[in-house]
Image (cartoon, rainbow, N blue to C red):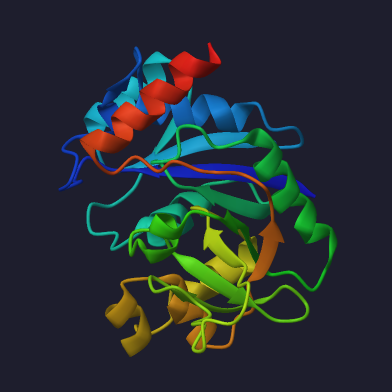
Amino acid sequence: MKTAIIIPSRLGSTRLPRKPLRQIDGMTLVERVYRQCKKAAGIDSVLIATDSDEIAKHVHSFGAEAIMTPEDCVNGTERVAYAARHLAEGYDVIMNVQGDEPLIDPAVIELVAAAFQDEKVKIATPISPLRDRADIENPNIVKVVTDSHDDILYFSRSPIPHDRDASHQVKYWKHIGLYAFRRSILEEIRHLAETELENIEKLEQLRWLYHGYKIRAVRVDYNSVEVNTEEDVQKVEAILKHNS
């Protein structure tokens, strides 16, 4: 089974302008994500999908491959699906690693890829424990609940499940910005109609659930830091300095 990682990267971020090219402790965000992905064992290719000539030029400068995609791709999944059509036929699993995860753990990538050893798995994504109350209440951190097979029932920006009587020791789980798809499924979900739930929550993955696609949760103990604001940049730089 061959696996490719495609990192969607575009300049049009509003909260952090020119985000992929933002320097984080001497290296751009997009290069940091790429180099973390390259550390994962069992991954056959890592590519960047972009609509920006400037990003593509930068990607080539550090030895990576860029695939140009149309400017009108409405989200990262559509950009990844477009790029995947340019891959050789032999690739079975396509992984979308969000371009705002500079500290993505290669072990998490490996665990998600391993989920496809189960032939029933069509889409997989990692989830990790939430322990801090502020994070549980934070609408920028997406929470998930699963069924008995670890297939995801729902994603929400609200704390789920809601402890109505405040009498349970609820375990909360957060979603990590990484998706993996069997190649044929990635092509299918490109054509799904938008849904009310995804527009309410502003979560594209709810479209897949609504239309009946199962998403396997891969449980990991990993505290991701997405870069969406200047404050996030400072958090990542503090972690890098602490670990150096």
Residue 225 appears left or right of 124? left
Image-quadrant location for residue 44: top right
Q: Count the marks: how many? A: 0
Provide residue 68's location: percent of width, then percent of height.
35, 41
Q: Which is more toward the observer, 188 or 217?
A: 217
Residue located 66% across and 43% down the image: 109
Image-quadrant location for residue 146: bottom right
Provide residue 132's location: percent of width, then percent of height.
48, 54
Residue located 53% across and 24% down the image: 35
Q: Which is more toward the observer, 14 or 55?
A: 14
* Residue 90 appears in the picture as rendered: no
Residue located 39% across and 41% down the image: 100
Residue 212 appears left or right of 138? right
Provide residue 228's location: percent of width, then percent of height.
28, 44
Q: Is residue 66 above or below residue 142?
A: above
* Residue 132 appears in the picture as rendered: yes
Provide residue 189's location: percent of width, then percent of height.
50, 74
Residue located 61% across and 44% down the image: 222
Residue 70 appears left or right of 179? left
Q: Is residue 119 above or below residue 23?
A: below
